[in-house]
Image (cartoon, rainbow, N blue to C red):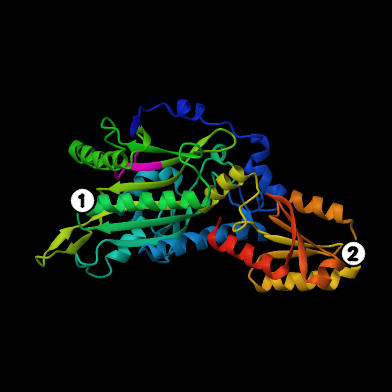
Amino acid sequence: MYAAVPYGTAAIFYAILPAMDGEEERDHKKLGAKLDLFIFSNTVGKGLPLFTPKGAVVRRELERFIVDEETRRGYQHVYTPEIAKLDLYKKSGHYPHYRDSMYAPIEIDDEQFMLRPMTCPHHFELYLSRPHSYRELPVRIAELAKLFRYEQSGELMGLQRVRTFCLSDAHIICASEEQTVEEVEKALDLIEYVNGVLGLTLGRDYRYRLSLGDRDNKEKYPGNKEVWEKSEALLRNAMKKRGVEFEEAKGEASFYGPKIDIQMKNANGKEDTAFTVQYDFLMPERFDLTYVGEDGKPHRAFVVHRSSIGAIERTMAFLIEKYGGAFPTWLAPVQARVLSVSEKSTTYTNEVLAALKGAGIRAEADISDESLGKKIREAKTEKIPYLLVVGDKEAESKTVSIESRDKGKQETTPLLDFIAAISEEIRTRK
């Protein structure tokens, strides 16, 4: 059975969840530096993360995963510019509503431009570039979009609150309210699938919030009461149909409509919105979004905004803390490290490394003069999923002695068998 949790009970909800072990040790800001994933530089600027090669691997895997999955589900991925005329955001209404969190306008050739804080106006302009028939709808426009928000200095926090981020954004143009409801449900299906692959569990790692408008705040929430109540009911019914618990939060909606937020809590106890699905009753009017119906006449379209994996930076922060830096093999920056027992086994060590890389596995080799014990300790500190120890015996039999980060020591295995096993683990994202 579903349950609509009253506004203000988030603390009670989280109080029943198991406490995160070693929260201090799981703080992504500390682990990010310790595991060489990202840095911040005062010379570059506050809130502007720089990803190291290892950190870039993690975010690239997340990006590839979501683009492939969305494409499989009928999304059309696009690229749009990271800067646009200020007039675009005045037209959408974002400029007056989010002006304080946007960067200052840039004067170019007597015109004002802005670093974009969102992509919806860009995607609407793409949709408007040609007529659309009702037979084409829904049209799902998606993008891994670089966005820019001016967060106050006191609000900045690691990768969770930054001033530039990459959002897995999408806008779905629908032909009817019924189609809109279907797309909301499909977006939630996608989000729950993504969470499952990432190892996140509803009730433990995330929860649902239905973010509503505030009828008394006409400046923040334009539109008549009936429109707001109808759109909120649409999302509320979608949540009831799923049979999941959710909180209703007054005054947390966007100015253009209510939304379903997926809330996550970090190691420091602060909650943030990770993913979201929004119903938009305002933009179709402002951008005159229409389609040609069966009768050959233009009809007003409906719009759903959604983010399936959220901001890549924020999602990385949650995952670093969720796993304490010990990522699943498919996400790990280094998936296997080959450790030579002695200098005599260097040749076979390099053969194993070449075979792993040839199979597309992210691998390294340690052929230093350090003791095997020290090599193992260092690799474990870096939370590498698999350590492959090779010596004379392994070289002769073309095997590897495996030590798994998660399962401990395992039997000596033919090299090709190990490659097949880890390749399957990576492919299935277990």
Amino acid type for the residue under numbered disc 1: Glu
What is the magenta segment's predominant secondary structure?
Answer: loop
Q: Position of residue 425 (x, y in %)?
A: 59, 60
Q: Position of residue 253 (x, y in %)?
A: 34, 39
Identify residue for label 2: 342
Q: Position of residue 320 (x, y in %)?
A: 61, 47
Q: Which residues are magenta?
A: 253-261
Between marks 2 and 1 in the image, the one whose residue lies nearer the viewer: 2
Q: Secondary structure at mark 2?
A: loop
Q: Is residue 293 visible?
A: yes
Whichever of callouts 2 and 1 sits on the residue coming sooner in the sequence is 1
Q: Is residue 258 magenta?
A: yes
Q: Can you tell which quarter of the image residue 175 is in?
A: bottom left
> On screen, 283 above or below 398?
above
The residue positioned 19% from the left and 39% from the top of the image is: 224
Q: Can you tell which quarter of the image residue 398 is in?
A: bottom right
Asked whether, in this view, residue 74 is left or right of residue 264, the answer is: left
Asked whether, in this view, residue 118 is left or right of residue 47, the answer is: left
Amino acid type for the residue under numbered disc 2: Ser
Identify residue for label 1: 177
Q: Is residue 110 visible?
A: no
